[in-house]
Amino acid sequence: MSKTIETSTTNGMPSGIPFIVSNEAAERFSFYGMRAILAVFMTSYLHMTESRSTEWAHTFTSAVYFTPILGAFLADIFIGKYRTILFLSIVYCFGHLALAINETENGLFWGLLLISIGAGGIKPCVSAHVGDQFGEKNKHLIEKVFSIFYFAINFGSLFSTLLTPYLLEHYGPAYAFGLPGILMFLATVVFWMGRKQYVHVPPFGKAYFKTVFGKEGLAAIGRLLFIYAFIAIFWALYDQHASTWVYQSKSAFLNKDISIFGIWEFTLLPSQIQAINPVLVLVLIPLSAWFIYPALSKLIPLRPLIKVLIGMFLCAGAFMIAAYIEHRLSQGIETSVWWQFLAYLVLTMAEVMVSITALEFSYTQAPNEMKSTVMGIFMFSISLGNILVTVISNYNNLPEAVATITAGSKTYISLNDYTPIKGEKIEFDGGSGLATLQQNSKTKKIDTIPLTGTYLVGAIDPASKQFTLEDNGWHAIETIKTANMEAGYKVVFHRFKHEAYFHMYALLMFVTAILFIGVAVKYQGKTYIQVERE
C-alpha cells in the first residue's frame, strides 16, 4: 500500500468501487458455487442422511456468519479492513483446496472450517469497506452502490449455481469444488490490484473500545441487537433454500423439465434450481427501486424497517408454497418445477426487502469507529438463524428401534414400537449390517455401499407390520447382508412429517412478523456517515 487515504473527497463514484465489486462477484461465485452442491455432495456422494446433512450445512452457515464478528475485531482494532480482507482471503483459498483434493468427510470438515474462517472473517469488512469509500460529498450514492454490490453478489452466484452442479454430475467433486477455488484466488488478486485506489480507514485501536463501550456505542448496539433478534428468524427460513428445498427438488415426482416456448428444452439438476434465486434478484433489484418501492411509498411511509416487515410476511408465504409442493410430492403426485420457481420468486422478493435493506441500514446505524463490528453483529443474526435450524433439525429426529431387517431385491423392515405410514422418510446412519449396490460414476463398476442415507417407507403389511424400503420415486431398494445388525440399532423418523415441517416454519415467521410490527413503526435511530478527520 503506497498511500493512505482516510476519507473520500470526490463528488462522484469512488475509483476503488470497480475493484471491490469485481472482487465480490468472483468471491460470491466461489462461495455460492461451493454451497450450491453441498447438500447433493453430502447426501449422494458421502451418503449422509438428510437430517445429518442439514445439520452439517446449517452448522457451516452459522460458522460462516459467526466469524464475521472476529474479523470485525481484527479490522477495527488491529490491522484495518484492507489487510483483514487480504489475509483471510488466503485462508479462504486453502479451504476450497481442501474440498477439491479430499473427497471424504474429513476433507469436508477441514474445507468447511477454513472457508468459514475466511469467508466469514471478510464479510463485515467487505461491506463496511464499500461504505468507507464515501464521504459527505457523495454519500447520496451509497444506496445505489449497495444495490450494485448486491447485484454483483447475485451475478457471480448465478453462473456458479448453474455450473458447479453440472461439474459435480459429470466430472465429480474435485472439479466441482476446484473451480470455486480458482475463482476465489482470482477474487483475492483483483482485490489486491485495487489497493492504491481505496479509501483506507485505519484501525481505531484503543479508541475503538471507548466508542463500543461508551454510551453512544452501547446504545447503537442495543437498538440493533433487538432488531436482529427478529431478523434471525428470517434467515432460519431463507437459508433452507440450500438444504431442505434441495432435498425437495431431488424427488422423482418433481418434474424438472423446462420448455421455453417449445424451442429450448432441457432438464435441471436438483441443485441447479437454486439458480433462479440470483436471476430473480437481478430482476427484482431494479424493479423494486424503479417501480415497487415508489408505488408502495404512495400507500405507506416506506422506511427501512417497514421493508423488512413486508419481507418477513413474504418469507412466510414462500414456505406455505413449499409446504404445498411437499404435500403433493409425498402423495406421489407429479409436480412441475414451476411451483418451486414460484416459491423462489416469493422468497427472493422477501430477500430483496430484508437483506439489502438490513445491510444498508446496519452500516448507516453504526458509529464510524465500529462499522465492521456492527456488520459482524448483523451477520451474527444469520448465524443465530442457522443455529436455530440445526437445533430444530435435531429435535425433529425421532429414533426408533429396529426389530428385524431382511435383505434382498426388496428390503423388509419391522420396528419394535412404531408403525410408520407409506411415503414417510426413514433414515439410516450405518450399523444395519446391510449394503446397497450402486454404480460408480467414475469407474462404471458396481460398488458395495453400507446402507446409509434417507429413504421412504414403502408398502406396509398390516399383519406383520413389516414394510419395504423405497427410494424417492417409490422404487424398491435392493440390499445385501454384509454383517449382523448392531444391538439396539435405531433408524430415524421425523416429528414434523412432510408439509408439516414447512408449515411449522411458516407459522414461526408469521408470528415473528406480527411481533415486529411495533418495532418497524416506532424505531428511532441515528445515521452515521464517514466524515473527514481533523
Image (cartoon, rainbow, N blue to C red):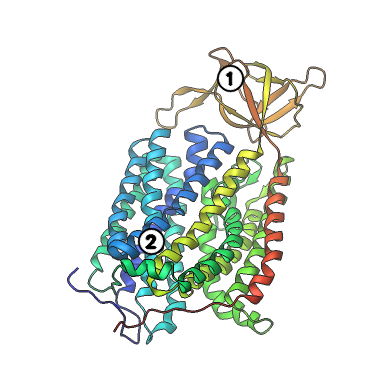
Query: What amino acid is labelled 1 in the image?
Result: Ser
Q: Quadrant of the C terminus?
A: bottom left
Q: Residues within 10 Å of mark 2 (few under 14, many from 20)?
A: many
For the question of whether residue 267 can be seen, the reply is no
* Residue at mark 2: 72
- Residue carrying label 1: 432
As shown in the figure, which amino acid type bears the numbered disc 2? Ala
Where does the image place residue 117, in percent across and percent down from the top left?
Answer: 38, 50
Q: Residue at x 71, y 41 (%)?
A: 496
Secondary structure category for the residue under label 2: helix
Q: Position of residue 422 (x, y in %)?
A: 75, 32
Q: Nearer the viewer, mark 2 or mark 1?
A: 2
Is residue 162 something one can see in this rendering? yes
Q: Is residue 215 left or right of residue 79?
A: right
Q: Residues within 10 Å of mark 1 (few under 14, many from 20)?
A: many
Check the image and name the residue furthest to the top.
Answer: 484
Which residue is pictured at 38% across the width and 66% down the height? 209
Q: Which mark is residue 136?
A: none
Q: Is residue 483 above or below residue 498?
A: above
Check the image and name the residue furthest to the right: 463
Position of 517 with respect to 14 (left or right) is right
